[in-house]
Image (cartoon, helix red, strand yellow):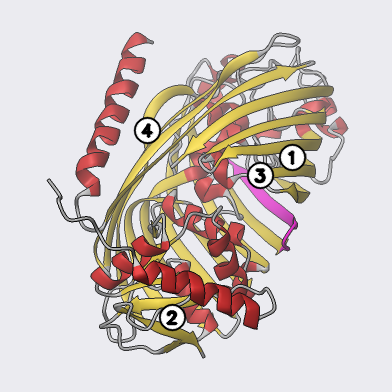
């Protein structure tokens, strides 16, 4: 713990002390962000909270440096540390690090390529999800941006081709990435096969996004499409000792997100809908045929943001996820697992209201209340099947800073 | 030690008068004008190109010279007027698009200046620079850019 804090301190001290030096270099920019949250839940655990006992284990810290070496060359890197209860331990990670080469640029279009660890364009918010200033509230809608599988979806080593087309009042932006998903995470294991000792390997995957903006962003729409492949190699002790009988499981995730936003002076309306087909093969664990069951995960949210006076914003959101759209209330799942796993693991409907106040341009203070039915986006590392409660509420507070 | 005091800033006074005149002429609507470094060849930009440049998506002028963007902080009223009257967008949208670039590593933020005097100085001293002021004064060492 002390070592990790020391490493964190040294990493960010190096980054920030480099800022003064970097500011002197032509084309170099340094930016950073930090947040600290408090979480109080009535039932269940989230980001280190315990029922009726506030948790302060929600923290984000990040810093980046970029160098525009010439109009055609950009080099960028960011370090992030995040604490979120059992989901994240604060270890410093390379969030992204890549070289960006612009191949074509004129008034009508640009076209370029990025090589390295690149953020994954998925929905409107995935690429900047750790930066409070870019979010409407403390938490992104968990249906689409689940914190428990954040590391899997966040960024990956690979190559991306991207471009922008200016078509009068319309701008089209696109990106296509071929990547190797990062799967060495207990969160992903818990999410896909419950906590087991086996490990995942990532298969070469693809992700693409098309974004349309009209009138400088008054209307925005997007389509993100991805195909991720992962492979699970069980240990003999996995699946209650059935691991040695199991095959190696293959999971393919075919996922798509439709995004729409309308921005007005005082109001912003955002809606996103995601559908993920989960194709599972070759687990063949005796008694656990559900591991080989294909499902379609359905997720969506509707959100309104109101800038009612300068520096103040109010948020209202309805957010829903169903891990099997054919079994929205989880009863078939409950029966198929012989009552061992609760139906509430399979869905979550979350009504959120929140406030944001900006006391200074670099500072934001947030408060939000969640009224939730279901636990589909709660981490199984924090909530055992026996302890999971279907109906629960959460209060979140957060102070955030960026420059 | 500086023995000779700086004479009153004539340009600043002229700018204040020009703004007042503009306010009277336009019935209270403030004026904002884009400015560029004297060597920038473009006299006009269409609104989409201006949005691309201030949105940090377009990195070069048509002649290949790198674009350097200067802006006032988001809470300055002049920045709000510029966004609404020239770019026809809301200041928070520009801020959001810069944040998306800066924290995903796919681009950089513009350079902020704190006063109109600093804006004129920076734009006049930086090849490829673009910025905006309330009103261009005839002997400012920058050239105005109009919307086409």
C-alpha gap between disc 3 and disc 2: 35 Å
Q: Chain of mark 1?
A: A
Residue that numbered label 1 is attached to = A323
Q: Residues within 10 Å of mark 3 (few under 14, many from 20)?
A: some
The tag on residue A236 is: none
- Gap in angstroms between the C-alphas marked 2 and 4: 34 Å
Mark closer to the chain start, 3 or 2 = 2
Task: Please give the name of the residue rendered at 52% of the width and 39% of the height, measured from the top-left corner.
Answer: A130
Q: Residue at x 60, y 24 (%)?
A: A37
Chain of the residue where label 4 is placed in the rendered structure? A
Picture coordinates of residue A195 (x, y %)? 58, 21
Disc 2 crowd rating (10 Å Cα; few below 14, some 14-19, many 20+) is some
Mark 4 residue crowding within 10 angstroms, few (<14) / some (14–19) / many (20+): few
Front residue of this view, candidates A352 and A43? A352
Q: Give the mark nearest the N terminus, 1 or 2.
A: 2
How many numbered badges does the structure rendering display? 4
Q: Nearer the viewer, residue A172 or A134?
A: A134
């Amino acid at each position: 713990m002390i070592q990790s804090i020391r490493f964190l301190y040294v990493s960010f001290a190096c980054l920030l002390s480099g800022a003064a030096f970097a500011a002197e270099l032509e084309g170099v920019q340094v930016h950073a962000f930090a947040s600290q949250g408090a979480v109080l839940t009535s039932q269940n655990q989230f980001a280190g909270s315990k029922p009726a006992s506030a948790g302060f284990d929600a923290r984000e810290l990040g810093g980046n440096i970029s160098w525009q070496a010439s109009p055609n060359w950009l080099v960028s890197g960011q370090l992030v540390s995040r604490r979120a209860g059992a989901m994240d331990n604060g270890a410093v990670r390379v969030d992204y690090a890549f070289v960006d080469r612009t191949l074509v640029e004129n008034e009508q279009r640009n076209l370029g390529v990025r090589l390295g660890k690149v953020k994954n364009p998925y929905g409107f918010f995935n690429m900047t999800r750790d930066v409070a200033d870019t979010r409407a509230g403390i938490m992104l809608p968990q249906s689409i941006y689940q914190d428990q599988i954040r590391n899997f979806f966040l960024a990956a080593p690979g190559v991306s081709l991207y471009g922008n087309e200016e078509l009068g009042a319309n701008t089209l932006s696109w990106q296509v990435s071929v990547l190797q998903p990062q799967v060495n995470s207990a969160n992903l294991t818990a999410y896909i096969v419950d906590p087991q000792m086996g490990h995942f390997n990532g298969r070469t995957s693809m992700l693409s996004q098309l974004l349309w903006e009209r009138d400088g962003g008054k209307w925005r729409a997007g389509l993100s499409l991805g195909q991720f492949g992962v492979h699970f190699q069980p240990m003999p002790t996995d699946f209650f000792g059935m691991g040695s009988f199991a095959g190696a499981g293959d999971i393919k995730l075919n996922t798509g997100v439709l995004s729409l936003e309308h921005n007005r002076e005082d109001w912003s309306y955002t809606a996103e809908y995601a559908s993920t087909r989960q194709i599972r093969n070759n687990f063949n664990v005796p008694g656990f045929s559900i591991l080989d069951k294909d499902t379609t995960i359905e997720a969506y949210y509707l959100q309104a943001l109101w800038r009612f006076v300068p520096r103040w914003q109010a948020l209202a959101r309805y957010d829903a996820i169903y891990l099997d759209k054919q079994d929205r209330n989880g009863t078939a799942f409950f029966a198929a697992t012989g009552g061992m796993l609760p139906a509430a693991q399979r869905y979550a409907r979350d009504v959120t209201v929140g406030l944001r106040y900006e006391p200074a341009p670099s500072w934001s203070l947030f408060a939000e209340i969640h009224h939730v039915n279901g636990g589909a986006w709660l981490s199984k590392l924090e909530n055992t099947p026996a302890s999971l409660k279907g109906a629960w509420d959460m209060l979140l507070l957060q102070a955030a800073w960026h420059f | 030690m500086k023995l000779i005091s700086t004479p009153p800033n004539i340009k600043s006074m002229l700018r204040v008068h020009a703004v007042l005149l503009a306010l009277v002429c336009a019935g209270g609507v403030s004026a904002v004008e884009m400015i560029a470094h004297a060597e920038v060849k473009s006299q006009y930009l269409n609104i989409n190109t201006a949005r691309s440049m201030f949105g940090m998506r377009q990195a070069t002028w048509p002649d290949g010279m790198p674009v350097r963007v200067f802006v006032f902080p988001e809470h300055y009223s002049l920045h709000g007027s510029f966004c609404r009257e020239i770019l026809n967008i809301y200041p928070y949208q520009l801020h959001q698009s810069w944040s998306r670039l800066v924290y995903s590593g796919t681009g950089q933020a513009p350079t902020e200046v704190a006063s109109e005097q600093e804006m004129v100085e920076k734009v006049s001293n930086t090849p490829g620079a673009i910025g905006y002021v309330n009103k261009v004064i005839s002997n400012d060492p920058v050239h105005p850019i109009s919307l086409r």
